[in-house]
Amino acid sequence: MKNFTIFTCIIALTSLAPAAEVLSSRSLFNGRDLMGWKGSGYEVKDGAIVSTPAGKVLFTEEIFANYVLEFEYKLTPGGNSGIGINYPGTGDATTGGFEIQILDDTAKKHQDLKEGQHNGSIYLLAPAKKKTALPVGEWNKQKVTVIGSAIVVELNGQIIVRTNLNELSEKNPELYGLMRRSGHIAIAGHGETVSFRNIQITETAPAANVDGVRAAGFAQIFDGKSLTGWKHGPGKTTEWLAVNGIIKHTGKVGEPQDLWTVKDYGNFTLVFDWRWAGRGPQKFQPVVQADGNNQIGADGDPLKVEIEELDSGVYLRGNQASQVNLWNWPIGSGEVYGYRTNPAMSPEIRAQVTPKVRADYPIGEWNRTMITLIGDRLSVSINGRVAIKDAQLPEIPARGPIGLQHHGAAIDFANLWIKEF
């Protein structure tokens, strides 16, 4: 079928390419308090985050994927700490993701270190190649680049680690954290005084084969730098942002405004990336069956399971009922909630708009999605898997804008391309 052929073609065209150019950064630490961080056993002193004897894991509230992290740290004699990358928010930073060692490895008590335990190493996995740390008590500048599975660590201007998580995972299959491609950034304390300041992050969009997508007849609907060509509802909002190829919504409560294209569209294929950039509350939501109906429990009521509530979507042709949901429900993203839950729709239509697979990647990772709408027929592919195929959307308008929904969760969009038919 034509729509399905389009999906497979575009999946090939949007294969990964080199990382995008780094543009602008923002601070993760305001120098005054621990706003935006979670954990205990840390204090702010003289514009720095300082670990105390009670300090264990302190981590960002936000989730990150594809970024450059820059910061300064200062050790005390014998000091021991670390930076956790792709930290899941619970447990140990070393196994939940991976830890970059920050350590006074000149101290006598650390004289019997194993390979991979020295300062700057990815703990026990990738040893630092050079010793570039300044004397204890001086501020060191560290830079960590995380692009998918590729990791580069620089200390005081010199590369000391260059490695790939896929390769490390193959050698260490028992370390499940190496499979993660997103997560919180953490400071992993070990009960000793270590200070951190000037913590900056530069986020980047996932790469795409721009030349290939253009050659296939697609046009950008987001220039990567501004919200030109987009509009939102009445009033002002500062929560929709354009930065480094990403359209971001901060998830701020009380900002329900959706973002719409200025232009109307009829028949098209839309290609885009999206990911959750923050956490959500725990809620109970129904288990949806393949026919679009909720599964019924032994008590005769709809069966519900506890999930982390994350909710957004893409509106088609200006119609809120024809929204392709992006969410963390058990059924997965891709469904058209306004049609599936409409009792006026036939059982066949309600089944058609229900995802056939849950194709979402773990929370925080980028998902590549394609939506094709021709007439009243919809197909949706997520991460190379077809979730909806040729579903009918009765009475959908012939033309209208495309909308990005904000429903209370921090979410990022990138690489928005469209081909009209």
Image (cartoon, grey):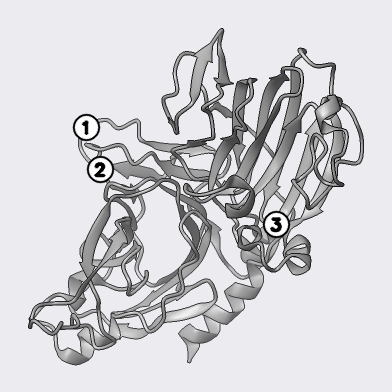
| Figure check: 319 above or below 121 | below
Instruction: Give SS at disc 2.
Output: loop
User: Which picture quadrant has residue 153?
Assistant: top right
Image position of 130 (left or right of 273) = right
Task: Give the Cα distance between marks 1 and 3.
Answer: 41 Å
- Residue visible at 56% across and 38% down in the picture: 186
Cβ–Cβ below 8 Å for labels 1 and 2?
yes
Who is closer to the viewer here, 114 or 210?
Answer: 114
Within 10 Å of the Cα at label 1, are there few (<14), some (14-19), or many (20+) other Cα atoms?
few
Q: Nearer the viewer, residue 191 or 234?
A: 191
Q: What is the crowding at mark 3: few (fewer than 14 residues within 10 Å), some, or many (at least 20)?
A: some
N-term mark: 1 or 3: 3
Residue 20 in sight from this viewpoint: no
Lateral position of residue 56 relative to residue 363, left or right:
right
Marks 1 and 2 sit apart, C-alpha to C-alpha, by 9 Å
Q: Residue furthest front?
A: 109
Q: Residue at label 3?
A: 149
